[in-house]
Amino acid sequence: MDLVLTTFLKMAFILAVILGLVPVLIWAERKGSAFIQDRTGPNRAGIAGIRLAGLIHPIADVLKLLFKEDVRPAGVHRVMYALAPFLVFFVSLLTYAVIPFGDYLEVGGRRIPLVVADLDVGILYVLAIASLGTYGIVMGGWASNNKYTFLGAVRSTSQMISYEISMGLALMGLLLVSESLRLTDVVAGQGQLLWGFLPRWGVVVQPLGAILFMTAAFAETNRNPFDLPEGESELVSGYHLEYSSMKFALFFMAEYTNLVVASALIATLYFGGWNIPWLSRAVIEARAGVLLPALLAAHVAVCALAAALYLRRASRERGKFGDARDREPGLMAGVCVVAGLAGLAALALRPWEIGPAGASLLATVLQVGAFVGKVVFFCWFFIWVRWTLPRFRYDQLMHLGWKVMLPLALANLVVTAVVAAFV
Amino acid sequence: MNGKVHGYGGKMTLWERLYLGEIFRGLGITIRHVIRNLLHTGDMPTVQYPEEHRAYSPRFRGRHRLMKREDGTPRCVACMMCSTACPADCIHIVAEEHPDPAIEKAPASFEIDLLRCVYCGLCEEACPCDAIRMDTGIYDLAADSREKFWVDKEFLLNNTTDGTR
Ligand code: SF4
Ligand code: SF4
């Protein structure tokens, strides 16, 4: 019974984090692309003048998509057409089941591992599920009865086949090093130090493998520079061309949940997962009496700085718009002040006298925070790359996949195997 | 931006063919833009459109206006030159007799279908008495029905030059 309850709670936590990240990512994509191209980006939609630099826009998008007509073009295969977006979205969420997002949570002397399903074959599961996502794309593209969507689906399949191999081979190199298929073991192994100072992260012991895996992950998630299945310059918008309303929204959200999956995988496999370098759980628990007050003080300082910046803006832009938008900087400064005061109140509760249970909780929170931070960084990395690189031509894509990445992945595997056998 | 551009089929150096170094160089360029724009949000060239308008050249051909005589009546003498010159056939004039015998005709109605107009400016050039001009500077035409783009004499006479609607 307990197991069921904790599992559901963990699933709820993961779902909340991912679904909360999706609008933030959409915002980051818009605002980031705008700033890269020297534009301002979205800044209009707002609730009573609160615009949060465009963060309200995804809400407006969802409202718009919900009220749009759900057009079903003539000649579609009804069942598959309706199923495809759900399949894409569902599969994109499945991978999270095996990704550990923290070490363990200690409740009443019992340790709850922070992973939904600690499978023995975690990595194989990840590979299996990752390729399932293409089925949704192929179904959507084929069932739409449109040549552009069909071409997008075909491209997606051939791309998946080409890059899946390099991805698997790159992962095998990592397996030789971590000596386990279980993702919790892979992450725990990365908590050690190499030669006493270097974190034993996957990227340190398998640098080539990390690059190959990340490249393949870009291809698997259909992100630029590998977004040929969408290729709006030649395929209009590829496999989801015929979808409208919430069905389109599902495809759109699946793109971002896939992004989070890929980032979580990269962070878990090659960048230490929930490990904080040089700050192992034992160290955090021993020094909790110093760490917690320091963190709270940093929180107060950041809040004070943000409040000061907002106040400066409020005084500079007084009456700039002449409507509700003028109130935003003042209100935000108020929010920052309240958050800072909450930090001060926590400081008044003598956080340096924290007990062992609190120290354990602090360690868990910090580790989960580190994991989420890494995931967010890689999400931003995906967005950053998308707005930096142009799209590959199709023959270049195939050339890179088969003639460059496959031999490199094989060489990486052989060298790793030889080193692992003799060291 | 260093002037070294590889033409189509040009040879790339080994370093460039390794992609990775060049990719990170590109990432460096884009992140520099992000950081600069984050620190100086006010300096972006974006025009906050509905509130701000870009200054267009005085020669810019915007929405038409009809000029007035000193007594406030239209300057137009309904000679039909503009509607003859119009390639889009979108000026519709009905002539009537002018009360002043020195002036032959005046427009009883003068209508332009702005949705058909291609803003070529030929009407302006054809007019013998400088009665129609396109110097209002108004370019953001928006309405919620087609009928509202069919503008009449009163509308055209009251158009201003300062770009306000
Ligand atoms: S601008 Fe050209 S198209 Fe428009 S009314 Fe004048 S002559 Fe016709
Ligand atoms: S050419 Fe000038 S005067 Fe003649 S009808 Fe047109 S606006 Fe009137």
Image (spheres, coloured by chain):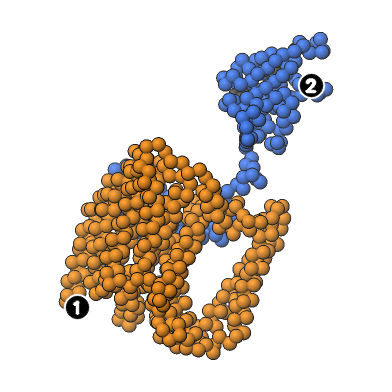
Q: Do circles 2 and 1 both sit on a common chain?
A: no
Q: Chain of mark 1?
A: A
Q: Colour of chain B?
A: blue
Q: Amino acid at mark 2?
A: Thr
Q: Which residue is labeled 2 in the image? A: B73
Q: Which residue is labeled 1 in the image? A: A423
Front residue of this view, candidates A163 and B43: A163
Examine the rendering and report whether any part of residue A142 can be seen. yes
Of all chains in the rendering, the one displayed in orange is A
Question: Label 2: few (<14), some or many (≥20) within 10 Å?
Answer: few
Front residue of this view, candidates A141 and A372: A141
The secondary element bearing badge 1 is classed as: loop
The secondary element bearing badge 2 is classed as: loop
Front residue of this view, candidates A101 and B67: A101
Q: Within the displayed image, which quadrant is ligand 2 positioned in?
A: top right
Q: Position of residue A390 (x, y in %)?
A: 38, 49
Q: Amino acid at mark 1?
A: Val
